[in-house]
């Protein structure tokens, strides 16, 4: 159980907060590349870590991420003109390049050097894996670009989506490292899910609803082993990687299915982006797999048209079907794995009051993840190497595997937990 002070420390991520300072030291998934698809396309609003920003792609295809409000009279640059290698404010015509330099100030006298003294807040961006990533921390602390396995694959081997979740990032992320809920929240639907069907591991999830947890620290975060009984001599292990500050890799079901992953990125203290990724390291995704992902199946969702807000949301009670719940066609009555999770996480309130929790043995990973985040805060000013920020910290996989009961999971699954793009993975 956390104190109120610790809960505040972990959940507040805006400018000037300790956790906000930590998160700004990592490359952050900011928006999908499809949101700014071509040079001089309309700018889009982006909110990250409590900061209101504007993203645009200039005439040469370069990406800018600027403070939303013009330095002149604070009009929103969302209404600006994206033209001739810059974003021009619609109010008085001040124009900014992707680095935030004011390159034109038509409202000032000809020959004035005033524009040279104006600098709009701007954050560097890169495009990788269909995502625009940004770095919002000190320039001299910028880490190498992300090398998560799914970010290095060819485009046809990966599918990425995002959805708006109306809760603090922490309770969403904690759901991602909680393996015990799978036997309950997803119990009656997982057989029909296209990413899980036809795999041996499902029977162990259903047969043993009391997994035993073993959690170990890794260079990048945590390795979380959920152990279930397979038979008298063997255990079925679902081993999850949590990579700081907010990534998880879902233990796969069968090598014929794609792997999955998530990232939970704070929009502000009461909302986050839940990123969902399916990928296969050794082959392109099949058209039937892509069709299911585009339709919102598996870890993806159906949207309200024209938005990234889920069709099932708190305003309609997540379209809960009580009859399906009663007939055991759905344990929670909510359709879809992601929204089954989100409905329960959002039900905790926008920021969960962790002083009211009573944690058990199955919550070991959640406890250690909180400790790692708090420990990283203490070391932030004294280190240049943060857990999860280095490429070698990110070259990992999760796995589902049968091991003899006498073999420690980290030893037995050692090779299966190493990411090697282009090679197949171990899973049952």
Image (cartoon, rainbow, N blue to C red):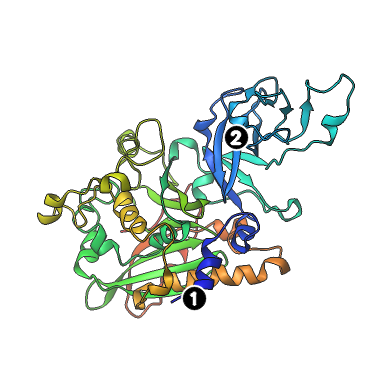
- Image check: 405 left or right of 372? left
Along the viewing direction, whichever of 259 and 102 lies nearer the viewer: 102
Q: Is residue 395 above or below residue 283?
A: below
**Frontmost residue, 122 versus 145:** 122
Q: Quadrant of residue 163?
A: top left
Question: Residue 426, percent across and down?
Answer: 38, 58
Question: In which quadrant is the N terminus drawn?
Answer: bottom left
- Provide the residue designation for mark 1: 3
- Tell me where residue 351 appears, x and y as whole percent: 44, 60
379 left or right of 160 in image: right
- Residue 253 appears left or right of 261: left
Decide: is 124 above or below 36: below
Q: Secondary structure at mark 2?
A: strand
- Which one is closest to the eye, mark 1 or mark 2? 1
Q: Which residue is mark 2?
A: 55
Q: Is residue 318 above or below residue 232?
A: above
The answer to whether residue 279 is seen in the rendering is no
- Local secondary structure at mark 1: loop
Q: Residue furthest front?
A: 73
Residue occupying image coordinates x 48% and y 73%:
368
Residue 155 visible from this viewpoint: yes
Mark closest to the chain's N terminus, 1 or 2: 1
Q: Residue at x 35, y 31 (%)?
A: 305
Residue 277 picture location, percent across and down: 43, 46
Residue 82 horizontal/vertical position (percent): 63, 23
**Which residue lies most toward the bottom here?**
406
Mark 1 and mark 2 residues within 8 Å of each other at the beta carbon:
no
């Amino acid at each position: 159980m956390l104190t109120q002070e610790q809960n505040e420390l972990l959940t507040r991520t805006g400018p000037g907060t300790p956790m906000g300072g930590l998160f700004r030291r990592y490359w952050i998934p900011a928006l999908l590349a499809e949101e700014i698809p071509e040079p001089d396309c309309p700018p889009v609003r982006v909110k990250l870590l409590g900061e209101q920003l504007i993203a645009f792609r200039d005439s040469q295809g370069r990406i800018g991420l600027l403070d939303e409000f013009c330095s002149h009279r604070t009009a929103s640059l969302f209404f600006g003109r994206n033209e001739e290698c810059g974003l021009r404010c619609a109010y008085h015509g001040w124009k900014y390049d992707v680095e935030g330099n004011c390159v034109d100030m038509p409202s000032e006298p000809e020959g004035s050097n005033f524009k040279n003294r104006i600098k709009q807040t701007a954050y560097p961006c890169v495009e990788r894996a269909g995502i625009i990533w940004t770095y919002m921390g000190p320039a001299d602390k910028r880490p190498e670009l992300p090398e998560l396995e799914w970010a290095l694959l060819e485009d046809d081997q990966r599918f990425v989506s995002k959805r708006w979740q109306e809760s603090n990032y922490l309770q969403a992320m904690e759901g991602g490292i909680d393996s015990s809920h799978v036997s309950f929240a997803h119990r009656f639907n997982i057989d029909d899910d296209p990413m899980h069907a036809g795999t041996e591991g499902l029977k162990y999830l259903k047969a043993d609803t009391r997994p035993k947890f073993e959690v170990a620290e890794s260079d990048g975060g945590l390795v979380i082993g959920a152990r279930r009984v397979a038979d008298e001599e063997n255990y079925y292990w679902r081993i999850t990687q949590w990579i700081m500050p907010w990534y998880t890799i879902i233990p796969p079901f069968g090598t014929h299915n794609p792997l999955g992953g998530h990232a939970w990125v704070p929009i502000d203290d009461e909302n986050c982006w839940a990123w969902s990724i399916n990928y296969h390291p050794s082959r392109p995704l099949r058209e039937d797999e892509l069709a299911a992902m585009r339709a919102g199946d598996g870890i993806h969702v159906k949207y309200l048209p024209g938005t990234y807000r889920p069709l099932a949301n708190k305003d309609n009670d997540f379209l809960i079907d009580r009859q399906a719940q009663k007939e055991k066609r759905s344990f929670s009555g909510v359709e879809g794995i992601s929204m089954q999770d989100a409905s329960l996480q959002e039900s905790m309130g926008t920021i969960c009051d962790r002083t009211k929790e009573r944690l058990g043995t199955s919550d070991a990973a959640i406890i250690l993840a909180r400790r790692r985040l708090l420990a990283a805060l203490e070391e932030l000013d004294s280190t240049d190497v943060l857990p999860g920020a280095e490429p070698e910290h990110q070259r990992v996989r999760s796995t589902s595997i049968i091991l003899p009961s006498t073999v420690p999971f980290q030893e037995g699954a050692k090779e299966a937990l190493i990411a090697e793009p282009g090679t197949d993975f171990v899973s049952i």
